[in-house]
Image (cartoon, coloured by chain):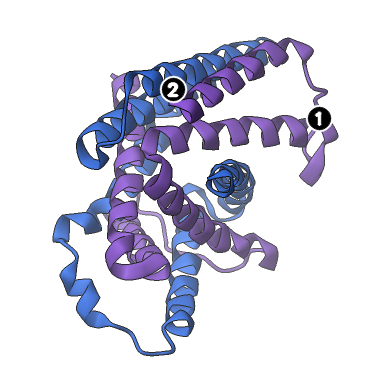
Chain colours: A blue, B purple
Amino acid sequence: MSFILTLAFINGCATVISKMINYRCTKVLGTYNGSLVNYAVASLLSFGLMLVSQNFEIDFYSFTQAPWWMYLGGAFGIIAFIISMITLTRLNVMESTILLLAGQLTAGILFDAFVFGSLNPLKIFGIVLVAAGIIWDNRISQKR
Amino acid sequence: MYAFFTLIAGACQSAMASFNGMITNYLGMFGMSLVVHMIGGLLLILYMKLFVHEKLKITGMPWYLYSAGFFGIFLVASSSYCIGALGVSVTTCISVTGQMVISAVIDHFGWFSVPKIPFNPKRIPCFLLILAGLIIINLA
């Protein structure tokens, strides 16, 4: 359990570093091309890693086994990216951060409840506390 | 209106994470990452061609900036793994906490040649509140 908690924490750390790298990419290539780099390199690299991890025998059957709507994950990611790029010109960073988080947590709680069936009131209370702390911290950090 | 769409964008991020978690059961970690990045990349190219009219160009950066892709894989793989065990909302909470902590550290020490911003002690109660929330989530 503590391994997964640590991994989730490291995921957050890597998110920040990845955002910094992506930001520098967009400075060189422009907003959209700079982000496209991430997708292009990641696709090639995952393909290579998949080949190696499956001993160069790709199981194409498994790709047809997954329900089609599960493939929409990447589409949702790109929708989120485009919306946040457009709205960021009209909202400040704090508003945008908090709204993104609120949307993520609301949808997250719904997904947890209805898809994964793992949720209870105490957990929601904890999530609300964390969200309150993050929003509070955002207000302090922005006021400087 | 913009606020509403930003909320939707957040919800899309959760949806992406959940779907990625589910498809990992079929395709494995790297198969999932391949599919997610390929579909995302193709849709992004489509969007650029139709609405932005920006010329496609991904060459000519310093080599180390291409590590962006490596982080992309690590992020989708680790989130889908954590979501399988913790659920979307808890994973999001811990991940955002990690983002805050590492940002504070990077700013404080001025790593990666960002301007140095010393840690503001007023933020400590916020971190304590988050910690309390995380402990409650853990107990639940």
Residue drawn where x is 77% and y is 38% of the image: B114
For residue B99, above or below residue A73: above
Mark 1 highlights which residue? B108
The residue carrying mark 2 is A127
Percent from the top left, x then y, of residue B69?
A: 53, 62
**Closest to the observer: B65 or B86?**
B86
Q: Which residue is drawn at 77% across and 46% down?
A: B112
Q: Quadrant of residue B10?
A: top left
**Is A115 positioned to the left or the right of A12 in the image?**
left
Give A18 or A111, whichever is nearer the viewer.
Answer: A111
Q: In this view, does B79 lie above or below B57?
A: above
Q: Which residue is drawn at 41% across and 65% down?
A: B29
Q: In which quarter of the image is the C terminus of chain B?
A: top left
Indicate the quadrant containing the N terminus of chain B: top left, top right, bottom left or bottom right.
top left
Q: Residue A109: percent from the left, percent from the top?
A: 31, 29
Between the residue at mark 2 and the residue at mark 1, the CA separation in whole angstroms equals: 27 Å
Give x and y (percent) for residue A66: 19, 65
Residue A36 falls in image quadrant = bottom left
